[in-house]
Image (cartoon, helix red, strand yellow):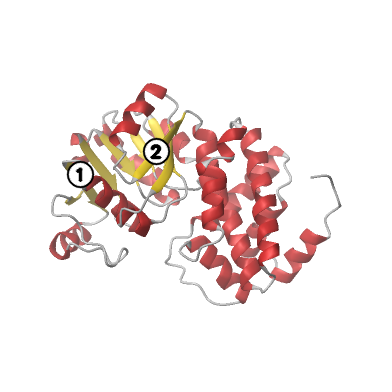
Amino acid sequence: MKITVVGAGAFGTSLAVSFAGSTDDVTLLCRTEATASRLRETRENPKLPGVTLPGSLNVSHGTDVLKQADVILLAIPMQTLSKYLETAKDSVNGTPLVACCKGLDMQTLMGPTELIQRLTPASTPAVLTGPSFAIDIAQHLPTALTLACPDDDTGAWLQACLSPPHVRLYRTTDTTGAQLGGALKNVIAIACGVAIGAGLGESARAALIARGLAEMQSLAGRLGAEPATLQGLSGLGDLALTCTSEKSRNYRYGLALGAGESWDDSTTTEGVATARAVSELSQKLGLEMPISQAVSDLVTGGAAVNTVMADLLRRPLKEE
């Protein structure tokens, strides 16, 4: 079994490290040869400090490596996925593609499995998502994730291939619900970070988590997802983790935004682009998503924290 993980960021590296402990042939595919060379020499990724790359883990560069893979995991930022698939489509050869990115594409408003179907139609798409931090996976701490694949036979095969001893995978065919849960929870995590950063308190954060989940379920349901999916690992589970831990980049971004502090724009924060995409998508669908819209207004500089919070509190009273 040959597993190739595309993307040498923290999460991609953690997955490669995890699989290398239980699979004979695992390759971590880097964006540049310079990065690959450095990782081969040092056996440590600066994005995942303290974790040594196993000697059995291959580190490479270039799309030709994809031709030998039995399964390919795409651990690259959501906003670069489309461009990468265009570049690599001739090397994929119908190999199952498992998206490990969370978000919606700003240009098409599509999730990762839709982009895979559109750009590499011969490959079966899947998504691996759920409550997980890169460092936890790399350190072999217990983790449970959702593996969503529209073809259940392929999903069962992937579930068996991608289950190291410390990771428990739950399978579903609901790719829409799974990927929307992973995308939308980042938006709500920013909102929760803003609340804590602005000193609004933990009660406000709890309210944002609960009402944020309601927004997630509303959009997912409109797009055909199964309600139970948003109650599972890829929805509620990921939401709870991301909205309460400073290991989450989206939550930390919200903390900085709420406190009026600067943020390193070079840090990938998927919820920023997703908030803008969700705002556009919800308006097209005629859905009210006030928390997501508030986050979109904040990240684009269209409103201040005190303004959006006052607007949320002034919304008409309603039944839950």
Q: Nearer the viewer, mark 1 or mark 2?
A: 2
Q: Residue at x 20, y 34 (%)?
A: 1
Residue 21: where, in percent of width, then height? Answer: 21, 47
Q: Secondary structure at mark 1?
A: strand
Residue 317: where, in percent of width, then height? Answer: 86, 51
Left or right of 82 on screen, residue 17? left
Asked which quadrant contains residue 147, the reply is top left
Q: Amino acid at mark 1?
A: Val
Which residue reaches farthest right? 317
* Residue 312 visible in rendering: yes
Which one is in front, 94 or 138?
A: 138
Q: Amino acid at mark 2?
A: Leu
Q: Dividing the image into 4 quarters, which one contains the C terminus?
A: top right
Asked which quadrant contains residue 257, the reply is bottom right
* Residue 107 visible in rendering: no
Q: Secondary structure at mark 2?
A: strand
Residue 16: where, in percent of width, then height? Answer: 26, 49
Cα separation between marks 1 and 2: 19 Å
Read off the residue under disc 1.
26
Which one is in front, 99 or 248?
A: 248
Q: Residue at x 48, y 60 (%)?
A: 269
Left or right of 220 on screen, residue 144? left
Which one is in front, 269 or 139?
A: 139
Number of other residues with Cα within 10 Å of mark 2, as a class: few under 14, some 14 to 19, many 20 or more: many
Read off the residue under disc 2.
169
Which one is in front, 257 or 55?
A: 55
Any mark on residue 319, and which? none
The first of marks 1 and 2 along the sequence is 1
Left or right of 241 on screen, residue 73? left
